[in-house]
Amino acid sequence: MKSKIVLWGSNAQDEKILIAIALRPDDNKVDIYTFPEEVATEDFYQQMMKEWRDGEGFELPENHTHLERELSVTESLLPEDLKVERTDLIQRAQTEWHFVVLSTKLRQMFESELEELREKVEGLKEYDKEVWENLKEFWSKLQQQIKDRNLVHEHADALRDATNELFGKMKEMRAKLDKEFEESSARVRDTFMATLETIYERLNKGEKFQTLFEELKKLQSQFHQSTFTRNDRSTVWEKLNQAFKDVKAKRFGGASEDSSTQIQRLERRINGLVGAIGKMERSIKRDHSDLEYERRKIETTDGQLEAQIRQAKILMIEERVRSKEEKLKDMNATLETLQTRLEKMKEREEKRKAREAAKEAAKEKIKQEAEAAKTLTPEEIEKLKEAAKEISDAKEEARPEDKDSILEAVGSTLGDSLNDLVDTASAVASVIGGKIGEAIEDLKEELGEIKDEVEEKVAQKEAERKAETSEKDEPQTKADATEEE
């Protein structure tokens, strides 16, 4: 952005003159030089364009007039008695130079703060984290102003170079401290890894899981209180986390622990996402507050340039809010998906636990019945046989008389009952064994004989039903034959 312009114009007497205008941003003023036509030749014009406008060492001839004016947004850059051919060039310079003045004031504020930081850095004998954080904070503010384009390129580049110089000095001091820190981190890392190897050896030897688990918890607490480099922290954490999984897997069994671990991991992820959503919502709220502030300020702003800067800021904030709201929408959708998945995982886990509890209850019931069956006498076993036969006969008499459904009824009802009895007998026999087992096997044989007798009667009745059907169909067949004749 040029701070000097040269153009042709005329004075109050309508005489052709050459006008040169230079901005003094530190003072918020402009210097206006005019040259009469006898001095302002074409060669002189070209010399002014190349040497004076783009350089600093050009000396103006004595035959010129000089006028100093305050830079204003509302008033014209030139006095009323001076006219120019390119009024658009004057208007553009007036607008841009007002921004340059504002940028200059902002640069001076940053330079003052930067000078204080420079004195602190040069006074350090070793790396100081607080000074480093102050420098980072200053850099963040500067970057924001550059991003908002509140500084012209020349001012931004000068401030950026000066800041980078201080960062370079701080990095040199930190490099020495980092080397010492890496050595310390390596020693702590090796201590943790050696302790974990010892725990694995004890785990393989069959030491109590509870003891090892408590030691891992203490080691985890020490880990959070220890200082590592990023790589060392990641290495130790992966080994420690794996040790927890291996101890739990041996203690509880792989499938059960895997399911529980997945639920815990998913819950931690949901909690983290809820926290991130809260931060995003607070960030959007702050942006809306900034937006309202800029809108209020633009209504009372002085000058077109400042209004343009604030309008640009409003557009930037609105775009930032739109982007964050889209991210928030995606985060809420992800949260809903994760919560649904968690509910299903918990439901499956409850069903699994219920099945395991039912299995344990069934085992216990069979065990109790087996213990009771061991005390049965041969007479009681004989009574059980007779009771089973009576039940079978009673179900046979209760069968429906409808001949079309007799096979289905007998097959489903009697077959299921006999199979249940046989299965129960087999289960009891496998548990208690011995004489009671032999008695149950006899009962199974007798039940099989009863089943064979029932099936034989069913087959006989089915044959009778078919014979009756054949007799009913025969007259109709003869009638059909007569009609054909």
Image: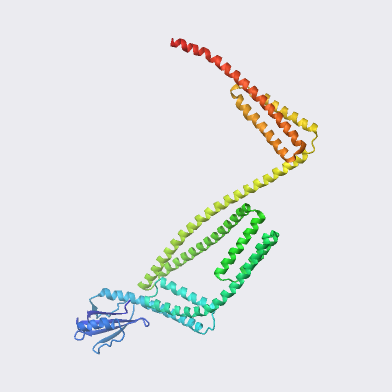
**x and y, in percent, of residue 172 in the image:** 50, 79
Quadrant of the image occupied by residue 4: bottom left
Quadrant of the image occupied by residue 158: bottom left
The image's colour scheme reads rainbow
**Numbered circles on residues, count:** 0
Identify which residue, 132 or 6, lies in the foreground: 132
Identify which residue, 165 or 452, lies in the foreground: 452
Figure quadrant of the C terminus: top left
Identify which residue, 68 or 35, lies in the foreground: 35
Figure quadrant of the N terminus: bottom left
Work out whether residue 398 can be spotted: no
**Is 454 displayed left or right of 370 in the figure?**
left
Q: Residue at x 53, y 62 (%)?
A: 276
Identify which residue, 100 or 262, lies in the foreground: 262
**x and y, in percent, of residue 439 in the image:** 75, 33
**x and y, in percent, of residue 253 in the image:** 65, 53
Is 135 located above or below residue 295 in the figure? Answer: below
Q: Residue at x 56, y 57 (%)?
A: 270
Quadrant of the image occupied by residue 455: top right
Q: Residue at x 67, y 47 (%)?
A: 357
Work out whether residue 275 can be spotted: yes
**x and y, in percent, of residue 364 in the image:** 72, 44
